[in-house]
Amino acid sequence: MWLPAKQINLLLLGLIVLVLVLWQQWPQANLKLVFCSVGQGDAALIIYRDQQVLIDGGPNNQVLSCLGKHLPVWDRSLELVIASHAEADHITGLIEVAKRYQIKQLAAVNEVNDTAEYRQLAQEISRQGIKTRELVRGDSVSIGPVKLTWLWPERPGKETLAWTGEAQVLGAKTSLNQLSQVIEGSFGDFDWLLTGDIDTKIEQKLITSGTLPEVEVLKVAHHGSKYSSSLAFLEAIKPELAIIEVGKNHFGHPTIETLNRLQQIRAAVKRTDQDGDVVVVSDGRNWWLN
């Protein structure tokens, strides 16, 4: 039975569209960094070929839209998920991510937090038996030619059962922001720095440690708080591009003080509240915004 020409044309058009979608989502040799627009919180993706690292999940489930947009439709696994620290604006979205994606490994600080979000995530991690590890200064992880190096925290947390679902939550005595994982990423000659919610006290410790690298891209700490991104810190790392993950908030983030300091070092600035998902691509030599 012959199909009418109109139906044949529609089938051909559908096949062309499908091929284009698959081609766009096919793993590429370039590195892609995606800073997701999730509101007042952090969520970022590192994508290299068919391997992905998710850093934080934001304050809601908008991270799922980011994953759906930037990962191939057939890929439902994440090689590594990093919870920079156990505050709700960084881990809430990870609860649903853990339910919908296969997480091969979780990197998290061994500290508990007396919140419903922390308890739900810890229980989900425990229920699924996701392998959890704590990485501190000097540790590193490689994904092909992509290397992640931990600059902070300097020592392990106090609660070894933090992510087993068995920890007794007594409330953190130390600011969890100051325990944020600080991670240097490198891919050939291209470098970036993820800073969680660290403040100027931790920045100064990183400066004096002598481990701070110069980078092309900086994820600005604590959504642009005036208590982070000191001029000394920015001058030490010399970022060409500063990315602020921020949404509507009552804290005044990003503050004029931080924006002025970024302007002073002549860093270009991108904000997820104004620019949506910010995508940086690198071939290991050059980098560009996508």
Image (spheres, rainbow, N blue to C red):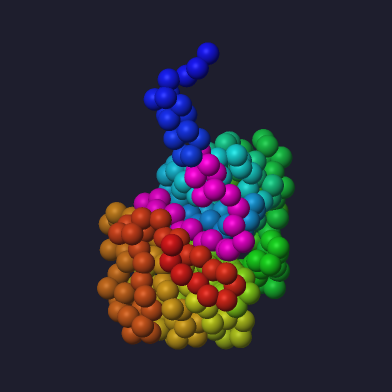
Which residue is at 43% across, 62% downward?
290
Give 282 or 107, whichever is nearer the viewer: 282
Would you place residue 215 above or below residue 165 in this image? below
Q: Picture coordinates of residue 242 (x, y %)?
A: 41, 72
Q: Picture coordinates of residue 53 (x, y %)?
A: 60, 55
Name which quarter of the figure residue 240 lies in. bottom left
Q: Is-magenta flag for residue 26?
A: yes
Q: Is residue 273 visible?
A: yes
Would you place residue 217 above or below residue 223 in this image? below
Which residue is at 71% across, 63% downward?
144
Total count of labels: 0
Name which quarter of the figure residue 244 lies in. bottom left
Give 7 or 99, whichever is nearer the viewer: 7
Which residue is at 38% across, 79% downward?
267
Give 23 or 102, whichever is nearer the viewer: 23
Which residue is at 50% across, 82% downward?
237
Q: Is residue 184 visible?
A: no
**What are the residue bounds of the magenta stretch?**
18-40
Give 162 or 191, whichever is nearer the viewer: 191
Name which quarter of the figure residue 289 lies in. bottom left
Q: Is-magenta flag for residue 113?
A: no
Q: Picture coordinates of residue 63 (x, y %)?
A: 46, 46
Q: Picture coordinates of residue 57 (x, y %)?
A: 50, 50
